[in-house]
Amino acid sequence: MKKILFIEDEVDHIEMIKTRMEAYGYEFLSATDGEEGIKIACEKKPDLIILDIIMPKMDGYAVCYALKQSDETRSIPIIIFTASGAKKLEQKCIEMGANEIIHKPCDSAYLTERVGFYLDK
């Protein structure tokens, strides 16, 4: 079973995405801040990470950078899931190693499709 780690500080978003991903047969892990997210990524080795940008303790940029610098987590695809919409910030995410950006709110079917792109190859 493929594992997804969702790093997001809003519990409502976590529950919504969890329900959707588990319905599609993925194992779902979550963290509510960046530090916890890095710890779980290193311990559990998810197949995909969905990452928010604005979070407590450590923002998504720092998390993305740290994950892409580590030999343990470098190859894990990262989807940035953000409400920002600022092109400059999006470019920074890509430069840090993120695979793509999806804007909140988004159609859950679209998010599931993009997750499938990375996990069901």
Image (tube, rainbow, N blue to C red):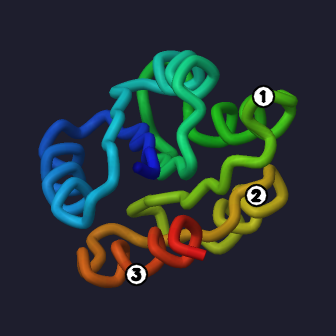
Disc 1 packing (10 Å; few <14; some 14–19; many ≥20): few
**73 relative to 27, above or below:** above
The image position of residue 6, as x and y in percent, is 40, 43
Q: Are marks 3 and 1 in contact (CB under 8 Å)?
A: no
Q: CA distance from mark 2 to mark 3?
A: 24 Å
Q: CA distance from mark 3 to mark 1?
A: 26 Å
Please state which of residues 41 and 3 is positioned toward the viewer in this rendering: 3
| Among numbered discs 2 and 3, the one appearing first in the sequence | 2
| Among numbered discs 2 and 1, the one appearing first in the sequence | 1
Q: Are marks 2 and 1 in contact (CB under 8 Å)?
A: no
Mark 2 is on which residue type? Lys
Find disc 2 in the rendering and name its residue.
92
Left or right: residue 17 compared with residue 39: left
SS for dot 3 = helix
State which quadrant residue 90 falls in: bottom right
State which quadrant residue 26 falls in: bottom left
